[in-house]
Image (cartoon, rainbow, N blue to C red):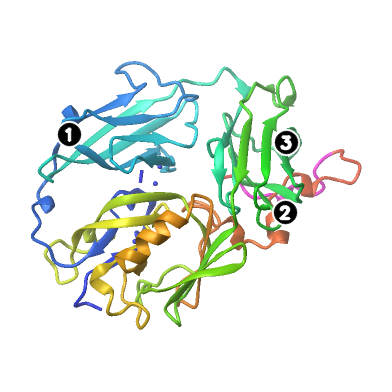
Amino acid sequence: MSQRSRSRTVPVCALLLAPLAAAAAGCGGPSSDPLAAKPYDASGQISFGGVEEGRKVDPDKPLEVTAKGDGSRITDVTATDAAGRYVRGELRPDGSRWRSTAPLAAGAHYTVRVSTENRHGRQGRRTIGFDTAPTDGKLRVSFGPDSGTYGVGQPITAELSEAVRDASARAVVERALKVQSRPAVQGSWHWVNNRTLHYRPREYWPTHATIDVRSALEGVKVGGGLYGGSSKPLKLRTGERIEAVTDAVTHQMTVRREGKEIRRIPVTTGKPGFDTRNGVKVVLAREAFVRMRGTSIGIPAGSADSYDLPVYWATRVTWSGEYVHAAPWSVGSQGYANVSHGCTGMSTANAKWFFDTIHVGDIVKVVGTGGETMTPFGNGFGDWNLTWTEWQEGSALAQTRPDGSGPADAARLRPEV
């Protein structure tokens, strides 16, 4: 899943332009590496948990892709539905297994693309399609991420088993989605589209907080003959507040723990035309090894700018392939110039320290580039780039009349996607 990056004389990191390209995030220079050869069929090297030919997949169960242990490893997985929406997932550092970390939709078609490497370093590919079983007509909610401990920037997600378009029905749903944190904070749901909501506090979560999320929809009439069904609750915890702020003008990253600076790192960011995105991003995954290729962003193989290199200690901040990672080829520019194709590059030692220090849900902010601001949704978690007022405008309850009788101005709700 990665489910769905880097001056001309040095290899550089590439920002992918579309979520489906996330599997081949890029960093490097001209290469005659044999891995650039046409991939072989990796069918015999991997298995798909819960996917059987001719049978519909249970959408309530995670999707798993496993290497069969013959010396081969999985290097990347992308899973998308028919609309191109990316299924988030996590790949083990040793490449032995990928597992989805976001729920599948009911009654949907998915395509899964898997990249592998055999024991000799040659790359393989395997693509399959499958359908998920339809819903029973009840509205269920799948919360994310998985239970566990996260950084203070981690939003909560709610994926609905059925689309909810009507403004009054949205208000019913939102009232039933309960979030309780200790210590208590002010927060709100925001409708991303007619099946997805995100929840975040007004400010970042408190450190060492406990967050309980549940649905009270069971048996509740939502509207149009749709009733709520049962849903599994979620419990999260937050760790220390860790923030990394990269200044593309000074070419420095400052890492703070609980507001205190713990390290300043020379970096390089995207050069003009490949500017790194400004704004707040949330760490999505930590990937000890990523194969990055220039072809993933449209650079022809064999051209002056082409590359195909192994990249280590990669911390992912967008699904389209923006990372903070080791870039030993650009150490001479780090702290002085921006020479990448969009990622934040640093020395191998600094990248390893960053990899070991940062966690999923921690905050990575970039300032001072010529690039656009990170989008709120669709390419990771850019939720914090909306002001609190903008965030609340995406809530159905924010549009409800004071007496609670219904939406005061349904037109202000976000349009369906």
Q: Residue 188: which numbered mark, if any?
A: none
What stretch of residues is rendered in magenta? Answer: 406-415
Q: How many marks?
A: 3
Asked if the residues shown at circle 2 and circle 3 are in contact, with their CB atoms under 8 angstroms apart, the answer is: no
Report the residue that reaches farthest toward the right. 403
Of the two numbered discs 2 and 3 in the rendering, the one whose residue sits closer to the viewer: 3
Q: Quadrant of residue 174?
A: top right
Asked if the residues shown at circle 2 and circle 1 are in contact, with their CB atoms under 8 angstroms apart, the answer is: no
Give, as a three-letter code, the residue at label 3: Lys
User: Residue, x 72% and y 54% (percent of image)?
Assistant: 392
Residue 193 seen by the camera: no
Q: Residue 392: which numbered mark, if any?
A: 2
Asked if the residues shown at circle 1 and circle 3 are in contact, with their CB atoms under 8 angstroms apart, the answer is: no
Task: Judge by depth and name the residue closer to the eye, 78 or 402.
Answer: 78
Q: Which residue is mark 1?
A: 42
Cα gap from disc 2 to disc 1, whole angstroms: 47 Å
How crowded pointer 2 is (Cα within 10 Å; few <14, some 14-19, many 20+) is rated as some
- Residue 329 location in percent, x, y? 23, 71
Q: Is residue 34 magenta?
A: no
Cα gap from disc 1 to disc 3, whole angstroms: 44 Å
Q: Which residue is mark 3?
A: 178
Give, as a three-letter code, the residue at label 2: Gln
User: Residue, x 14% and y 39% (percent of image)?
Assistant: 118
How crowded pointer 3 is (Cα within 10 Å; few <14, some 14-19, many 20+) is rated as some
Overall secondary structure of the magenta section: loop
- Residue 214 in the figure: left or right of residue 265: right
The mark that comes first in sequence, 1 or 3, is 1
Q: Quadrant of the N terminus?
A: top left
Q: Quadrant of residue 295?
A: bottom left
- Residue 355 location in percent, x, y? 40, 56
Task: Judge by depth and name the residue closer to the eye, 238 or 43.
Answer: 238
